Image: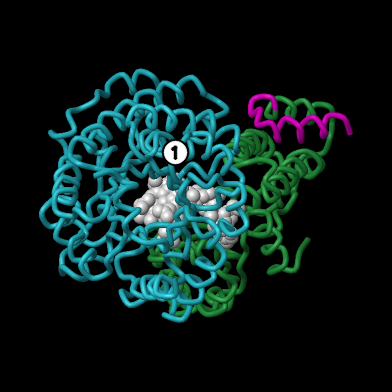
Amino acid sequence: MEILKKISENLQTGNAPKVGELVNKALQQGVSPKDILEGGLIDGMNTIGVKFKNNEVYVPEVLIAARAMHAGMDVLKPILSDSGVEPLGKVIIGTVKGDLHDIGKNLVKMMMEGAGFEVIDLGVDVAADKFVEAVKESKTDILAMSALLTTTMPYMRTVIEAIEKAGLRGQVKIMVGGAPITDNFAKEINADGYAPDAASAAEKCKELLKVS
Amino acid sequence: MDFYKKLSNRGTVLVAPLMGLPGIQLTKTTIKENLENAEIQFQTIKKLKGKFNPDIVFPLMDLSVEAEALGLKIKKPDNESFTVEEHPIKNISDLKQLSIPDPKSTRLAVFLETVKKMSREFTDIPSVAYTIGPYSLAGLLSGTENTAMNTVMQPEFLHETLKFVTELINVYGKALIEAGAEGICILEPAGSLLSPQMFEEFSGNYIKQLKQSWKLPVFLHICGNTTNIIPKMLETACDGLSLDSAVDIINMKQNIPENILIFGNINPVATIAYGSREDVEREATALIEGMRHGKNYVLSSGCDIPADAKLDNIQAMFDIAEKYKMGE
Ligand code: B1M
């Protein structure tokens, strides 16, 4: 559909006002919210994700595309929930305590949203008890942690132990990522998954929940 | 004496890790004490020099000191690097509130004093000072994420910010030179977030101005994977590139002219700080072997070595280099 293609293209070039406008227009034309999400917003984000992986676009462009996606989501979200389109699952994400790096985490969050997950962002410098509380508060499928410092990555283990202690480990999948994190480290600390970049993080979520 | 003259007396297998922080293990001091007191920092560097005999010495790395000089709020833990707490410069009128201070009246004075002591005392090897790079400093003023987006959304504001911070870095660099620095290494960690064109426009062109102004050897260090921007880093006319462990420098050396020094690039964290001695020996050997045909190579860490790194692993770099020196 022409208008979905336009949404995807404007998202990729980061034209936030235009994306919001086009999403509204598509709704008026009677396109279903689900099609707008999948054929427009998610399609655009996926394309950006692949281009980022291949060094065809860089961090600034991805951040700007993410902003445009949010502009589209702001219009779409209330309608999506009214029309009964269920998110694939609920993710709680945060950068661990002592760590202020959030650019990577924000990209991961956006790709997850783009893939159809509901994501709750706890921000940066998040302590274990805050993660535990958030998981307790509402039904969470995945707990996602990011760390960019070698000094803060061990804290991921602390969070996982706190989740275990609170008796929540059985009901939530845990995934980790960030530049210094490796697959081995993830296994060592008893996480369920690791992803090297934002696009694969969204894929990993689907894999962990066996949805697609 | 000048940088190259001193280096030419040091043989062919040069070693200069970006090590300042681990020195606090030798002086039993805190990071905070070193970043606030020139005498303490100088003693830390002196101990490092005495223990390892490097071919170039650097001060401790501190990416917050220029931002502090501009009045930003800094968090100063006892034993972690200082960080900038708030990034309040959102538009031109915020920017206009800032002014360039006299470096001596700010914490920049700690580094001026440290470099002065270094260059006086260490007559055998060059003392190279650090400054932050313009794009990274702009990131601290306005927030890294905003600044990245501003390369596309508000390039005029970003250029105004860059002009201003470049002037501060220029003034600070000149004061470092006056204090005795024989080279300056510009630290531009956020440079690797940019595409080659963006890097040229928002970082490289400003670094080129600094190089022209300072008229002494200038090196450029960028953390992360810089493979794609190396040609643009070379266009800054800097005299050397310090490349992080994500770059395959053995493969890239053919693209770097022989008059440009290449510093690199053992993984400072996985290998040097927390790896085994054998890991360091293996990587150092591979690098020296792989880089041999260039006389322009300096064995170093890919980036700053963490404070709690095993000192014996740092020693291993020097031991391997020594082995090659003996063989010559
Ligand atoms: C849950 O599942 C998942 C799955 C995948 C996940 C995931 C979670 N999270 C991330 N991913 C993955 O997907 C993302 C997209 O593909 C990727 O995310 P990344 O985050 O890796 O990638 C981002 C898209 C882009 N990359 C980044 O955003 C990081 C870039 C660099 C330049 C960087 C930045 C920007 C900053 N820094 Co900092 N910084 C550096 C970085 C050096 C470099 N060039 O890499 C790094 C990470 N910093 C470092 C350091 C030491 C520090 N920093 C500090 C501060 C800062 C700024 C505030 C200035 C700024 C952060 C701004 C912000 N809002 O995030 C200080 C610490 C502050 C703190 N307590 O956290 C300070 C201590 C001070 C200093 N020396 O600079 C180094 C870490 C060394 C180490 N290994 O421990 C560093 C490598 C630079 C260096 N060598 O000095 C993947 O890792």
Residue range of the region highlighted in magenta in the rendering: A1-18
Which residue is denoted by mark 1 in the rendering? B238
Query: Any magenta on residue B85?
Result: no
- Where is the C terminus of chain B found, in terms of image quarters? bottom left
Q: Is residue B24 above or below residue A199?
A: below
Which secondary structure dominates the residues rendered in magenta? helix
Q: Is residue A71 left or right of residue A181?
A: right
Q: Is residue B233 left or right of residue A68?
A: left
Q: Position of residue B287 (x, y in %)?
A: 52, 66
Residue under the point 81% across and 41% down:
A39
Q: Is residue A4 left or right of residue B121?
A: right
Residue farthest toward the right in the current orientation of the protein: A1
Instruction: State which chain disc 1 sits on.
Output: B
Say which of B76 and B286 sits in front: B286
Count of picture labels: 1
Can residue A119 be seen by looking at this rendering?
no
